[in-house]
């Protein structure tokens, strides 16, 4: 058999045992906290119908959706039809202009292709080297290639699920979802084509109590993971009010997008961007005044007071400030390490939030946000079911993993798989080991028997490589005396005990 | 917004909260048992490179692989090149026959397409209605459509992983893997296009101790799930010996495939199939004699004795019998409910096993096998790394789910998400509830506060619909007296307790 070069597709990853255990430590922690707060699990398929996804993520997002070919249709007729139809579509008018054009028919056309292969090669080469040419002729094809695609996020499939099942769901419906998503993004450090999202949403309720609970979920998770984090909150209502204060409510998204960059580019460049977007000096002045309230960062009461002063006469603004005050008032008495900070500079960029917004940053480490979310007005309107508002948060698991690696926060137990290795000293000894192993397994001790009776050296090496802390030796002497020798590899200590005491031994 | 018809792709499923909890009960049980036996988790990407998968599952399997378009390459150049190149390839000889053929070049060809759209329509229609035509011209295209595909099983990605990492792995490498796979099969009852596989394999060891452990894993899992199951074992060595006994060792697969059907079609039809496959009367007689040993089913000692008699002079046969005797001897002293049965009629059809084979059936229910596996000679040879033998088993999770549903084996706790609902009686009361909820959550009690202060009726209905067993009521009186009322909805009983005793209450 010829040697095959093997690898995984660009931007995807294998997760070996140690990494899976560490990732599961994060996933299980988040999952258990979601459940402590009454959230219920949902799983949707990896594939969605293409029309469920298309048009939901903007033009750029649409381009990043992985399409799946319907191989169940063995000859890809739909695709071929799509290809050929496209070639027609962009010059359909030609037919109208030349009604007598029906020259050769059916296979005569295919014959033309067959008879002029160099032409085809030449065309293919031209298209493959000239991107603009290819773009012009081929890009509309993409929407015709398949009826299915890999899911791009968890929110749209959730919306689709709620729209399909809204008559049978109990509202408010609190769901969490931890599943992989796929994006045909250019892979780079920290950005993958397959990655997990980890979301919790409450839909069917306008109550701010949901925001309070979601903030508490963040605090509980990061306390459990021992990640020191700050939960920053703001409200889109405040940003709307800011636009109103500037006298141009319709510039709210422009202002939001500019403010969103302040962490990366600083205040001066934000002001510059606003000027480039045709805001006048007075307007930029108002925005600057607003952003400077962030200098009281850490003192939520003062920030809230300053915001109230700024928005005295603006109903939307006061509503937004009251919202965040409510969240702060209902959380500040709880004993979490991770605290909530009101942050006027928080904007959450392009996302279509309408109320409170969240973002979480890890302290003591250079890393982008490790969580974010907010309130939205209408989850399922896109799918024909209007008036279901909601609020949700998500955890950035890959970044949380990196933070925990960097700060060495994974507990050492995570690295232990097998706790006890039984040495193999022969057939009768092995049979005795099986009996003892079942007793230990009944006590939830993870153990295994070395697979062949070879030199101790080799068996020890296996235990070391697998990071197994205990070894149990049963030789013919022990078999006769009904004892076993337990060796603690980390301490280098060993002791003999009667086999009927084995389940009382503490393998910690 | 226009109403959109929503659904999931054919053969895929949403799993709502109750189903996820039941599925996770199965997955978590299997996972914990795998770990008790020293197996380590592995996760591979949903997508593999197409050439990793193609040719590994036979011609039929190849057709069922879902291909993914490389949308990251925004213009699908590779696909178009593939399409055009294909059209050349099957008539490449034409060029040689007509060296002067370079008539029109490059875009003149595209122009031809554009100028004759009706021709294209006609061709597309012809291809889409005449399957044979389409097959002839288009089927080789499939291998050129994309560089990526969704994984079809867990074994080939595991083999690819071992081949890539074999220098860094500790052998024997015991891995388990619980992930979805995708097949473009025609969906039907119990057959899905996206479903989970749940595998454990040991590679890099020829020891039969691995088979013993895998049999024990089956027994442990089904005991924990309270599924009464029988673990049937046989050996491909025995089936090889049977073919040798018939004087035609090269007919081993024919014989295996026929025997594999005995459960479904019965002994007479198996004999008939063997005759149709040109086995003579004497050969069929030998096979019948072998199959009739199964009449001692349940009495492993007698079956083993009969097999030894039949294969007295056949080295391979005796080796196979000794193998299953070894497994039986090393497991029969263990106190499992699920027992091992030696089953001469077990064949495991088309799978390329070479040694012991396993199959698990649930008792007291009509259902196909709920687990299967066996030993294979060479896992990674296909990927250029020879001589890594292994043995593995898998669990059929969808069927196990159906068995447990039918026999009502899911424990009632599985259906409880939130354990305690705090009624909402207003803002101050809500704030007190948040404090108490954090105390309960610290004790791993799952609780939530109703999202708005509405009539008790509505709050009760929510608790009932969500199957929440306890309700806690804190009104202004309780707030003042520092008490709360705990109501057990199932029993219809309630009691008032001081709030500082709440964490001592048993919410069972």
Image: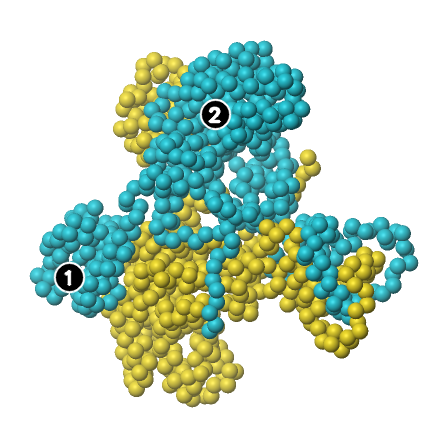
Chain colours: A yellow, B cyan
Q: Residues within 10 Å of mark 1 (few under 14, many from 20)?
A: many
Where in the figure is residue A437, as x and y percent of width and height? Answer: 36, 27
For the residue pair A129 and B401, the one nearer the viewer reads as B401
Front of the two marks 2 and 1: 2
Disc with the residue nearer the chain's start (2 vs 1): 2
Farthest-out residue, right: B100
Q: What chain does mark 2 sit on?
A: B
Circle 1 residue: B474
Query: Residue at coordinates 42% horizontally, 48% vertically from top-left?
Result: A23
Residue A323's place in the image compared with B462, above or below, is below
The quadrant of the rendering that contains the N terminus of chain A is top right
Circle 2 residue: B233
Residue A460 appearing in the image: no
Where in the figure is residue A404, as x and y percent of width and height? Answer: 40, 52
Q: What chain does mark 1 sit on?
A: B
For the residue pair B152 and A270, the one nearer the viewer reads as B152
Q: Residues within 10 Å of mark 2 (few under 14, many from 20)?
A: many
Q: Is residue A392 left or right of residue A457?
A: left
Q: Is residue B296 left or right of residue A438?
A: right
Q: Secondary structure at mark 2?
A: strand
Q: Quadrant of residue A94?
A: bottom right
Q: Secondary structure at mark 1?
A: loop
Residue B270's place in the image compared with B6, above or below, is above
Query: Residue at coordinates 62% horizontally, 46% vertically from top-left?
Result: B63
Residue A325's place in the image compared with B395, above or below, is below
Query: Residue at coordinates 47% horizontally, 85% vertically from top-left?
Result: A279
């Amino acid at each position: 058999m010829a040697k095959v070069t093997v690898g995984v597709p660009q931007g995807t990853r294998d997760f070996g045992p140690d990494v899976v255990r560490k990732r599961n430590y994060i996933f299980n922690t988040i999952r258990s906290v979601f459940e402590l707060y009454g959230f219920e699990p949902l799983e949707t398929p990896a594939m969605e119908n293409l029309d469920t996804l298309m048009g939901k993520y903007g033009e750029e997002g649409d381009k990043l959706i992985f399409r799946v070919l319907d191989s169940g249709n063995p000859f890809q007729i739909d695709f071929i039809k799509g290809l050929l139809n496209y070639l027609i579509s962009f010059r359909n008018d030609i037919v109208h202009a030349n009604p007598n054009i029906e020259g050769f028919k059916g296979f005569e056309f295919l014959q033309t292709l067959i008879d002029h292969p160099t032409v085809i090669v030449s065309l293919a080469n031209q298209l493959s080297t000239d991107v603009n040419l290819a773009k012009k002729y081929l890009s509309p094809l993409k929407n015709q290639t398949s009826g299915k695609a890999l899911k791009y996020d968890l929110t749209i499939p959730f919306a689709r699920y709620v729209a399909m099942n809204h008559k049978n769901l109990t509202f408010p419906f609190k769901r969490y979802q931890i599943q992989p998503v796929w994006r045909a993004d250019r892979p780079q450090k920290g950005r993958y084509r397959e990655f997990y999202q980890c979301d919790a949403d409450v839909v069917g309720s306008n109550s701010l109590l949901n925001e309070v609970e979601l903030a508490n979920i963040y605090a509980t998770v990061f306390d459990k993971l021992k990640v020191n984090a700050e939960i920053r909150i703001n409200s889109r209502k405040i940003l709307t009010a800011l636009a109103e204060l500037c006298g141009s409510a319709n510039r709210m998204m422009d202002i939001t997008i500019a403010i969103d960059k302040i962490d990366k580019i600083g205040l001066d460049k934000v002001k510059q961007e606003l000027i480039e977007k045709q805001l006048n000096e007075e307007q930029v002045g108002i925005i600057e005044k607003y952003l400077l309230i962030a200098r009281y960062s850490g003192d939520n009461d003062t920030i809230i007071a300053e915001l109230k002063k700024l928005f005295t006469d603006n109903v939307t603004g006061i509503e937004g400030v009251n919202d965040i005050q409510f969240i702060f008032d209902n959380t500040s008495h709880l004993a979490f390490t991770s605290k909530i900070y009101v942050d006027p500079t928080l904007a959450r960029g392009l996302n279509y939030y309408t109320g409170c917004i969240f973002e979480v940053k890890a302290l003591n480490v250079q890393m982008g946000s490790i969580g974010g979310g907010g309130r939205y007005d209408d989850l399922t309107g896109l799918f024909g079911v209007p008036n279901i508002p909601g609020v949700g948060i998500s955890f950035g698991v890959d970044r949380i993993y990196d933070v925990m690696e960097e700060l060495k926060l994974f507990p050492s137990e995570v690295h232990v798989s097998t706790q006890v290795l039984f040495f193999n000293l022969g057939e009768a000894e092995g049979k005795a080991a099986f009996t003892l192993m079942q007793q230990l397994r009944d006590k939830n001790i993870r153990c295994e028997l070395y697979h062949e009776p070879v030199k101790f050296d080799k068996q020890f090496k296996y235990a070391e490589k697998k990071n197994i802390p205990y070894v149990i030796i049963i030789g013919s002497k022990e078999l006769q005396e009904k004892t076993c020798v337990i060796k603690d590899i980390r301490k280098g200590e060993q002791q003999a005990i009667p086999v009927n005491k084995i389940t009382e031994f503490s393998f910690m």
